[in-house]
Image: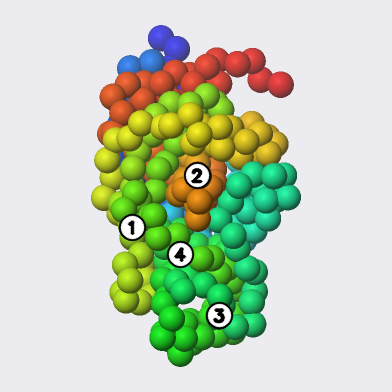
């Protein structure tokens, strides 16, 4: 009997079995007749050539090992999303590319020498980060702490972003739109993470997640964001927040290792598994 093609779901050593999404996806892949297993991306014994496809999933330590991670991605022969997409997306300076392409994004100041005097609340964060690590929301009157945060990031050689804190996030949260092969799959609502006065977040954080319905306006902005991205995308997550005038703007475009919130949308794991199965069945170039 011919063995089933195998798919690796790339994770990291701190989560060797993958996250909840990975486990749901693994079960759905099994139902498609594929072998699936979580493999740490830096496992020295992993034989990446032996997999029909390697899907980047919960590789959540890449932010502190970025060069090593991108070197690994470049040598994996069948990777989704591919290495060139990961290289572009793992540094949030991609927001400048989206802005230049006319996509509405949260206003961002890059490597500023001081905290803003014209925004009553603002967020300081590094351009390479995940899960709100090393991120904080600051208010007028907290300039001393905000400057110390800014200085620490700059002295570490990190690219720094400063964005206005959009107050509608406190009531509406973030809306995540999930796409499978550039087709809309489902949406989820993420509760606010950055609380006023909470200070610096030094470890990954995630807000409470619930199901959501995407509006036509949100879908239109997400489509514009994805249209600005070249390359082959198995999955994408577009995180939107209400802008100053209430219209949706892109907060982040997650193409590397986003949570897919499969548990919030029945049938979504099977949808992604079918897309993977189609890729596995394609003739090699």
Quadrant for residue 220, please give it: top right
Q: Is residue 42 above or below residue 258?
A: below
Is residue 260 shown left or right of residue 277? left
- Depth check: give the residue in front, 33 or 1: 33
Residue 143: x percent and y percent?
47, 86
Earlier residue among tags 3 and 1: 3
Query: Mark 1 falls on what kind of element?
Result: helix
Picture residue at 60% right of the left edge, 83% below the top: 114
Earlier residue among tags 4 and 2: 4
Residue 284: x percent and y percent?
66, 20
The residue identified by callout 3 is: 117
Q: Quadrant of the N terminus?
A: top left
Query: Mark 2 falls on what kind of element?
Result: strand
Marks 4 and 2, Cα distance to the nearest angstrom? 14 Å
The residue identified by callout 4 is: 165
Q: Are marks 4 and 3 in contact (CB under 8 Å)?
A: no
């Amino acid at each position: 009997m011919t063995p089933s093609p195998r798919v690796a779901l790339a994770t990291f050593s701190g989560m060797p079995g993958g996250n909840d999404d990975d486990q749901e996806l693994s079960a759905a892949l099994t139902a498609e007749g594929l072998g699936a297993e979580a493999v740490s991306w830096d496992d020295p014994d992993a034989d990446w050539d032996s997999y029909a496809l390697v899907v980047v999933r919960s590789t959540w330590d890449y932010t502190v090992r970025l060069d090593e991670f991108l070197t690994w991605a470049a040598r994996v022969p069948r990777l989704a999303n591919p290495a060139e997409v990961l290289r572009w997306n793992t540094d949030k300076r991609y927001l400048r590319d989206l802005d230049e392409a006319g996509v509405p994004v949260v206003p961002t100041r890059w490597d500023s020498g001081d905290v803003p005097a014209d925004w009553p609340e603002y967020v300081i964060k590094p351009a390479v980060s995940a899960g709100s690590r090393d991120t904080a929301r600051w208010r007028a009157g907290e300039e001393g702490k905000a400057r110390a945060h800014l200085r620490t990031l700059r002295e570490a050689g990190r690219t720094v972003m400063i964005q206005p804190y959009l107050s509608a996030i406190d009531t509406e949260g973030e809306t995540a739109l999930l796409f499978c092969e550039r087709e809309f799959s489902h949406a989820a609502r993420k509760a606010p993470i950055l609380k006023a006065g909470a200070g610096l977040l030094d470890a990954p954080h995630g807000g409470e997640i619930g199901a959501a319905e995407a509006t036509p306006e949100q879908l239109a902005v997400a489509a514009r964001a994805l249209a600005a991205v070249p390359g082959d995308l198995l999955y994408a997550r577009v995180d939107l927040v209400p802008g100053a005038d209430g219209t949706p703007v892109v907060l982040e475009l997650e193409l590397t290792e986003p949570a897919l919130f499969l548990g919030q949308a029945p049938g979504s794991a099977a949808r992604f598994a079918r897309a993977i199965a189609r890729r596995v069945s394609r003739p090699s170039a």
